[in-house]
Image (spheres, rainbow, N blue to C red):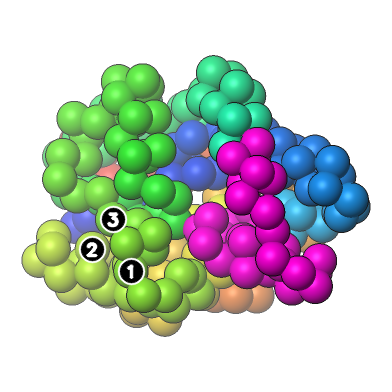
C-alpha cells in the first residue's frame, strides 16, 4: 500500500529531546522532596503534555506543586534541553527523501517549543502550517483528536496516512484514528520493552531508525 501522507510525533521522533527533558524534571522533583527514577519518569511522564504531567506529579505528591518549582523546571529545560537537544539522527535525510508527501506534526508539546526547535533545526519548511499538538486540544494522547485533526486538515483519509510514534500512548491515539502506525525506537529515551509495548498497542511495524521507516513505507520522491 502506498501511503499518501506522513504524520510525525515531535519529541522522540523529530527532536531527540525526551531523555534530556525528563532528566531535568527528575532533578527538579528531587529538590522538592519527591523522588522518581529516570526510568519511571520516562515510562509515566515523558509522552505527556506539561499540563497532564503536573496533574500526575501533584497526585504523587498529594499536594499542589509550588509555582517556584514550575519556574525552576522551565529554567532547567531552557538550559539543558533547548541548548543541548539535537534532531533525531536521519530525520533531515528522511524528510528530503519524502519531500513529495504531505506531512504534519502531531505532538504533545507546547506550540512555541515545537516552532522554535523546528526553526533551530532548519526543518520548519517541511511542515508549514501543519503543526498540531494536544497542548491546544481538550485531551492528550491516547485520545485520537490530534490525529483526526491532522487528517482533516490534510484532506486525506486516515487509512491512507502513516504515523510515526515513539510511545504507547501515541500509538494508541493514531491507531484509534484508523491510521497505520510505526513504532519508532531510535530515541535516547527508549527503554527495554518499549518496542514490544508499542507492537501490543497496535503498531504495524517497529523501526529502529529512519532507514527502516523508509523501507517499510516504500515511499520515495
N-terminal label among 1 and 3:
3
Residues packed near mark 3 inside 10 Å, few (<14), some (14 to 19) or many (20 plus): many
The residue indicated by pointer 3 is: 132
N-terminal label among 3 and 2:
3
The residue indicated by pointer 2 is: 150
Magenta stretch, main secondary structure, is helix
Residues packed near mark 2 inside 10 Å, few (<14), some (14 to 19) or many (20 plus): many
Does the magenta run of residues contain 67?
Answer: yes
Residues packed near mark 1 inside 10 Å, few (<14), some (14 to 19) or many (20 plus): few
Any part of residue 164 in sight = no
> From the viewer's perspective, is residue 32 above or below residue 51?
above
Q: Quadrant of residue 17?
A: top right
Residue drawn where x is 59% and y is 40% of the image:
71
Magenta segment: 45-73
Q: In terms of secondary structure, where does tag 2 sit?
A: helix
Residue 63: x and y, percent?
76, 69
> From the viewer's perspective, is residue 186 above or below residue 109?
above
The residue indicated by pointer 1 is: 137
Of labels 1 and 3, the one closer to you? 1
Hey, which residue is sitting farthest left in the picture? 155
Residue drawn where x is 34% and y is 30% of the image:
116
Q: Nearer the viewer, residue 162 or 148?
A: 148
Residue 22: x and y, percent?
69, 43
Amino acid at each position: 500500500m502506498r501511503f499518501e501522507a506522513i504524520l510525525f510525533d515531535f519529541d522522540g521522533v523529530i527532536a531527540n529531546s525526551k531523555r534530556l527533558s525528563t532528566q531535568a524534571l527528575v532533578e527538579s522533583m528531587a529538590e522538592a522532596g519527591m523522588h522518581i527514577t529516570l526510568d519511571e519518569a520516562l515510562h509515566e511522564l515523558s509522552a505527556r503534555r506539561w499540563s497532564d504531567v503536573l496533574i500526575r506529579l501533584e497526585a504523587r505528591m498529594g499536594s499542589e506543586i509550588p509555582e517556584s518549582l514550575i519556574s525552576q523546571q522551565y529554567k532547567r529545560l531552557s538550559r539543558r534541553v533547548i541548548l543541548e537537544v539535537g534532531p533525531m539522527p536521519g530525520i533531515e535525510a528522511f524528510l528530503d527523501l519524502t519531500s513529495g508527501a504531505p506531512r504534519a506534526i502531531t505532538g504533545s508539546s507546547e506550540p512555541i517549543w515545537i516552532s522554535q526547535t523546528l526553526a533551530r533545526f532548519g526543518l520548519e519548511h517541511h511542515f508549514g502550517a501543519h503543526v498540531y499538538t494536544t497542548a491546544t486540544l481538550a485531551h492528550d494522547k491516547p485520545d485520537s483528536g490530534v490525529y483526526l485533526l491532522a487528517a482533516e486538515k490534510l484532506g486525506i483519509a486516515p487509512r491512507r496516512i502513516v504515523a510515526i510514534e515513539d510511545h504507547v500512548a501515541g500509538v494508541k491515539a493514531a491507531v484509534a484514528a484508523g491510521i497505520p502506525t510505526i513504532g519508532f525506537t531510535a530515541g535516547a529515551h527508549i527503554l527495554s520493552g518499549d518496542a514490544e509495548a508499542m507492537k501490543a498497542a497496535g503498531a504495524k511495524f517497529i523501526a529502529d531508525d529512519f532507514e527502516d521507516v523508509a523501507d517499510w513505507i516504500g515511499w520515495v520522491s
